Image: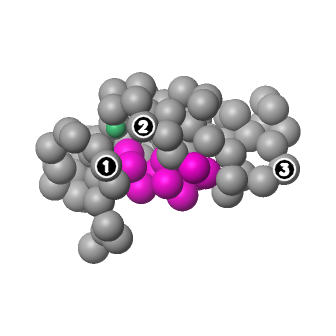
Amino acid sequence: MWPSRRSCKHPLPQAGTPDADAAAAGAEQLVRACHEARQFTDVANFTLRCGVCQIGLKGEKEAVMHAKETGHSNFAEY
Ligand SMILES: [Zn+2]
C-alpha cells in the first residue's frame, strides 16, 4: 500500500489505524500552517524534520507519508 519504507527505525504501525490517520492529518495541518505562515511557494520541496526519528523529510508528500507509516506527528521545520 505504501511505497518504500524510509529510513525510520521505529516500528511500522498498521496503516489505516486511527493513530496513523491522526498523525497524517496532523502532518498535513502542520504543513499547511507552515505554508501559510511562511508563504512557501513550493510546498513540495521544503524540508521538515521528524522530531522522533530526526530524519529529514522533503515536502508535504514525504511528511504525510512518514506520518502514515510511523504514526509520528512531531515535525519541525528543517
Ligand atoms: Zn519518524
Badge 2: how crowded within 10 Å, few (<14), some, or many (20+)? some
Q: Residue 24 or 51: which is nearer the viewer?
A: 51
Magenta span includes 64: yes
Q: Are marks 3 and 1 in contact (CB under 8 Å)?
A: no
Q: Is mark 2 within 8 Å of ligand 1?
A: yes
- Image spot of residue 6 (x, y percent): 34, 54
The amino acid type of the residue labelled 2 equals Ile
- The tag earlier along the polypeptide, 1 or 2, is 1
Dot 1: element: loop
- The tag earlier along the polypeptide, 3 or 2, is 3
| Front disc: 3 or 2 | 2
| 1 over 49 or under it: above or below | below
The residue that mark 3 highlights is: 41
- Image spot of residue 37 (x, y percent): 79, 30
Taking the spot 84% from the left edge, 39% from the top edge, the residue there is: 39
Residues shaded magenta: 58-68
Q: Are marks 1 and 2 in contact (CB under 8 Å)?
A: yes
Look at the image and tell me in which quarter the N terminus lies: bottom left
- The tag earlier along the polypeptide, 3 or 1, is 1
Give residue 7's mark: 1
In 3D space, how far apart are the residues under numbered discs 3 and 2 (Cα atoms)?
23 Å
Q: Residue 29 or 1: which is nearer the viewer?
A: 1
Dot 3: element: loop
